[in-house]
Image (cartoon, grey):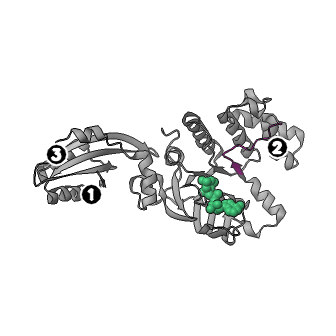
Amino acid sequence: MASHRPLPRVPLPGQPDRPAPDAIALDGVSRRFPGGAVALDEVSLAVREGEVFGIVGRSGAGKSTLIRTVNLLERPDAGAVRVLGLDMLALDDAGLRAARRSTGMVFQHFNLHTRRTVAENVAFPLEVAGIPTAERRARIAELLPLVGLEAKRDAYPAQLSGGQKQRVGIARALASRPRILLCDEATSALDPETTRDILALIGDLRDRLDLTVLLITHEMAVVKAICDRVAVMEAGRIIEEGRVFDVFTRPAHPTTRSFVAEVIGLDVPEATLARMPPPPPGTIRRLAQVLFTGPHATCPLVSEASRRFDLDINIVSGRVDEIAGEPFGVMALAAGGSAGQVGAAFAWMRELGLIVQELDR
Ligand SMILES: Nc1ncnc2c1ncn2[C@@H]1O[C@H](COP(=O)(O)OP(=O)(O)OP(=O)(O)O)[C@@H](O)[C@H]1O
Ligand SMILES: [Mg+2]
């Protein structure tokens, strides 16, 4: 999926700039449902102002419980929740209502009122907040162009496509001028092209309105398209976290590796492998996926490796891609020679800073 937004403006770890303050800070948050498993198990997380932070995980990992903890739709059993500097658990009802207005939420299934028009759906949270009619009208007139729905003002949800329905959901989430947008699988009910449009819209709104976005998804492609940083969840815990580029190019946890492989892994065509002659007696052939993130060019590397280690190297497939604006190349190669030399060649590539992952075939 292509990147739809400019380079992140958020100071990232390792950079000398002072990092942006935390918009959302969870500390040791736990939640167990009665009679159920632990949905959140001491989760700590800091989302900086202005970033798009992704949470990725399989079904049941605890993602929705986590995002609902941020605006206290779900109350944790233990831990601290701070949003824009406020201790959410210490607020009284009026304070909580005010704090919730600073966090807009977007849902997978849109949650629109079927009997209300687009404009009436967008106005709904303003009505609930007791905003006078004239002010509501003015706000709707600002919001609909922001999400490209001026022409659908008086349409009913049943007359809209999935992408248009989600635009209504986004406009409604923005009605109270929140600083934070919480998106729970906002694109999971949409086709890939509409997903790209909606992600581009969210990225654009982040830039134009200076929003912080916490986005939940089970798709690594969504993370790759829009997020600055990502946390991977499994069984109620965060198992890995970092800049999207780092997590994609150096996944540490096996679950993260399998997620990443879905997006940047190469197809190794069986037919190509089948066409290769068997390795001569006394030699082996090993397949590896090599990720280039640094200044190394592929061709000198392959010829250099084959000279140094006396190997036959075939490039089986390859591609150049980009994550969060940073380019990388990935290539699958078959290296044939003595077992010691093949191992030495992979070790040499790793020393050069390439990420070499052996494929079991
Ligand atoms: N209201 C509830 N009552 C009981 N158990 C719940 C409740 N909500 C969630 N759970 C359980 O908590 C765990 C985490 O659920 P959660 O909805 O947060 O997962 P998720 O990562 O959002 O999954 P999905 O990708 O399917 O939306 C699951 O085991 C789920 O069955
Ligand atoms: Mg969920």
Tally the numbered discs. 3
Q: Main secondary structure of the magenta part?
A: loop
| Direction top: furthest residue | 151
Per the model, the C-alpha gap separating discs 3 and 1 is: 26 Å
Q: Amino acid at mark 3?
A: Pro
Q: For the point 75% across and 32% down, which residue is it?
A: 158
The magenta span reads 104-115
Q: Position of residue 291 (x, y in %)?
A: 33, 49
Is residue 227 found left or right of 294 in the rendered image? right
Q: Position of residue 324 (x, y in %)?
A: 47, 46
Per the model, the C-alpha gap separating discs 1 and 2 is: 56 Å
- Mark with earlier residue (3, 1): 3
Q: For the point 41% across and 57% down, which residue is it?
A: 251
Q: Position of residue 200 (x, y in %)?
A: 57, 38
Query: Which quarter of the picture shows residue 256?
Result: bottom left
Q: Amino acid at mark 2?
A: Phe
Question: Do labels 1 and 2 touch, CB within 8 Å?
Answer: no
Height in image: 317 above or below 179?
above
